[in-house]
Image (tube, rainbow, N blue to C red):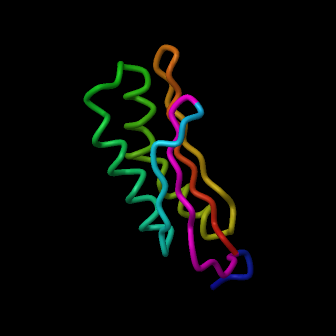
Amino acid sequence: MTTQQHAVGLYYCECYVNAHRLGAYDAHSPREALRWVRISLMVIAITLDEEPYRVARTWLDDGQPTATRDLEEGKPHTLTLKQGTTAATWTISPIT
């Protein structure tokens, strides 16, 4: 563990759609937390319009290394997709 990393034992994951919590999950590693978000995104991907799909695809393809680094450093990570009047937000918060 580098001096920049924090000892974290749990990551609290939530998904909200328009301020209504749809789900929550306690993960034991950044990898497990990101898998929860990744699976959620893959489930809804086919229902998204082009722009939110592109944002989701970019996060799936390129955003996870940054998210992993943030989580390992004890920082929360958030991803929000907007489609029309709907906003879906996934948040992962390290619990120290």
Q: Quadrant of residue 55?
A: top left
From the top left corner, tell me how far across and down residue 36 is, in percent.
Answer: 39, 57
Give the residue furthest to the bottom: 1
Quadrant in the picture for the C terminus: bottom right
From the top left corner, tell me how far across and down residue 72 is, in percent.
Answer: 61, 70
Give the residue furthest to the top: 84
Residue in the image at 42% along x and 67% along y: 32
The answer to which of 93 and 16 lies nearer the viewer is 16
Q: How many numbered circles does the render carry? A: 0
Rendered position, 77 above or below 7: above
Task: Give the residues in magenta.
Answer: 5-18
From the top left corner, tell me how far across and down residue 28 is, in percent.
Answer: 49, 75
77 falls in the magenta region: no
Residue in the image at 53% along x and 27% along y: 87
Q: Quadrant of residue 44?
A: top left
Residue in the image at 25% along x and 29% along y: 46
The answer to which of 91 and 51 lies nearer the viewer is 91
